[in-house]
Image (cartoon, grey):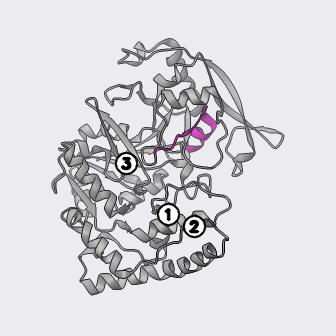
Amino acid sequence: MAVKMIVGLQYGDEGKGRAVHYEAKNASIVIRATGGSNAGHTVVANGKKYAMHLLPSAIIRAEVLSMIGPGVVADLKVLSEEIEQMREAGVRIEKDNFVISQRTHITLPHHKQLDRLYEMLKDNKVGTTGRGVGTTYEEKARRTNLRMCDLFDSEAELKHKIAENLKVYNVLVAEANKLIENGTYEEEKFPMITVEEEYEYCMKYKGTVQEFITDTHPIIDKAIEKDELIIIEGAQSFWLDNDHGDYPMTTSSNPNSSGTASGAGIGPTLINEVVGVIKAYTSRVGNGPFITELNNEIGDKIRDWGHEYGTTTGRPRRTGWLDLVMIKHTKNTSGLTSLCVNHLDTIGKLDKINVCVGYKYKGQTIKHVPIDKQNCKPLYEELKGGWSTEGATTFEELPKEAQDYIHFIENYTGVHVKYIGVGADEKRTIIR
């Protein structure tokens, strides 16, 4: 058997989509396992750029079965529009190369309004994308949310489930609108949403997605029995994990490797490889601690050179030096077998590069990540930059300084760097 997992180790946007698409050329199935339309995966293949939010990055490969797993929360509108957009771009999406688990939960219009409402009420704002992902997971945990299989219920059954799901929403909105009316908050009033409105919403987009909805477990079982390669595609990243990340400035799911395996429906003993994807620097969207952040000209240069703007929101990402303390922390918690380092070409444009190798924390020097890492100050080691990766197709063809940078990462983390991204197109990948 061969099951390979690809997960992010920083704050998302590390280039997981690129790595998944590259590995998918030999795969039978690629499973998107967690998260929702707040994820943004960009793939540049054959000179063409594809941006995806819910579809697995392998959807561009028509010969591979792309699957949305049970751990995903899917916005019907976003998914339907994404399918149509990809088809218009010439990507084939049919029942034989794309399926959706009937257990996948659905993000509905009221989830997005709840997202906005919660953010309004918070003093310490998370900086959510407002896509309704967290509130969908909330109602999933409350056991009232809809799943893909519910779209096939009778009208009466489906409306009853929607009514159960809307009860809390309409109570909260009524109270929130009172606060807006009396001037406590300067916001537009929140709409009361009816059962009929959400039922019509479900019916509108059911037509696009219904042919793909199925029980995905037998498909996975068959591929495992036949020893076919399965790729599990992670979303978001380790430090946004709701259990292990920078809580509460996290996502609402578990994008660590264990949570990703669970979202796909594949047990840990079946997974042969766990590839952790990082950038050669660090970036973050939204609020939360960022120890190596660069609020200066260098940070601006990295942002521009690396095109650091959110795939989902378009927001400029915060940028900073590579933090190897954070990466090493994920070695055992993620069960890493190798690393993929992207944007080696970007960081090499700087003549001098700092890498975080420890923290100053409450008067001590530490080399682990404490729960209150906002109290940490970075300790750096300076490395020589000034390299170009142009024309390099093997590790040996990279400039010595670039090789040294990779070796430094390996020596500190104790994890082999197997993949190196040296350009935007997935063909610009060096395998060691």
Q: What is the crowding at mark 2: few (fewer than 14 residues within 10 Å), some, or many (at least 20)?
A: some
Q: Which residue is mark 2?
A: 118
Numbered disc in front, either 2 or 3: 2
**320 left or right, relative to 415:** right
What distance separates the C-alpha of mark 1 from that of mark 3?
20 Å
Examine the rendered structure and indicate whether residue 201 appears above or below residue 100: below
Return the residue at label 1: 134
Residue contact between numbered discs 2 and 1, judged by CB atoms under 8 Å:
yes
Image side of residue 183 versus residue 188, left or right: right
Quadrant in which the C terminus is drawn: top left
Q: What kind of element bears circle 1? A: helix
On whether residue 212 falls in the magenta region, the answer is no
Seen at 32% across and 34% down, the residue is 44
Specify the segment rendered in magenta: 314-330
Q: Amino acid at mark 2?
A: Tyr
Q: Quarter-wise, where is residue 299 in the image?
A: top right
Q: Give the amino acid type for the residue marked by disc 1 in the picture.
A: Gly
